[in-house]
Amino acid sequence: MSTPAAGPELGAFLRAHRALLKPEDVGLPATSRRRTPGLRREEVASLSGVSIAWYTWLEQGRVTASRQVLESVGRVLRLDDAEVRHVLRLAGYYEPEASMARKSVSDSLQPVLDSWPTSPAVLLDRNFDLVAWNAAWSAVWGEPSAVPADRRNLMWFMAADEHLRGILPDADWEPLAMSVFQHFRAEAGLHPRDARVAELYRRLAADAPELSHWWSCHSVGELTTRVVTVTPAGSGPLRMALSSLRPVDAPGSLILLFTLRSKEDRAILADLVDRPLRCVAPAREAG
């Protein structure tokens, strides 16, 4: 895949932020012989590890730029996380690498998940690994922590978890599962060298070999809003609407939220949450 090209908006953004800095802001000696405010192009280029000609062309929108170089330029220009995200998007990148540690994301968003006591909600990282979830999620879909970490992934749950397959009718399970896989492929394509992606496909091939034709399919798509019906053991059916949300300060993450469709559904789920914790069935080992 070719590197995205820079454009005039990116150049204007870099020039504007270059003009805001003083030499002493970046550890350079102050001088009085500056006709315009801010850093010179050659100073930004030197501190970023690129040539003055290349940096000049970058501001002019004449060259392509790698993510790593743009992030280096961002550090020199003292850009914050939101500004770095903006630079990368202007250069054609979908999103920056995760700027927050996994635990930090979980800690900051767990209260958000918990604020939906009757709406199953889960936080996924960019590989669809489950990072955090609320009590309503565990009550309906099973307790994720009961599953080994290498299987604690939404694709694995959709394909190989017997509890999840048992509470979803085939009419809802297959389109939902396929939508999850298609969305994952679209996301994984942005990170082709991520070792976790290959690990997930190996795990799925071992635990759900009957779905091997799904792994070889190259279709992509979005995880769009839909209504599904689940029937947890010992309760009536629940109709839930799926929504997906992206946290602003962790754009590589995804929150899935299932909203109950009626007052009766919410009463059933409240009863499920009050019951003893239901654990996910242990995964079968490949022979």
Image (cartoon, helix red, strand yellow):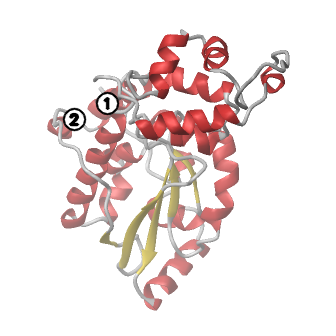
Residue to which mark 1 is pinned: 201
| Residue 107 left/right relative to 221 | right
In what element is the residue under mark 1? helix
Q: Which residue is drawn at 82% across and 18% down?
A: 27
Q: Which of 106 and 42 is in front in this view?
A: 42
The residue sitting at the bottom extreme is: 263
**Residue 107 picture location, percent across and down:** 70, 50
Say whether marks 2 and 1 touch (CB < 8 Å): yes
| Residue 247 left/right relative to 188 | right
| Residue 241 left/right relative to 40 | left
**Residue 37 picture location, percent across and down:** 73, 32
Badge 2 amino acid? Trp
Q: Which residue is drawn at 33% across and 42% down?
A: 184
139 w.r.t. 28: above or below: below
166 w.r.t. 286: above or below: below
**Residue 113 picture location, percent across and down:** 60, 63
Pointer 2 local density, CA inside 10 Å: few below 14, some 14–19, many at least 20: some
- Spatial separation of the CA atoms under disc 2 and disc 1: 7 Å
| Residue 153 left/right relative to 45 | left
Q: Quadrant of residue 112?
A: bottom right
- Does residue 101 appear anywhere in the picture? no
- Does residue 284 appear anywhere in the picture? yes
Residue to which mark 2 is pinned: 215
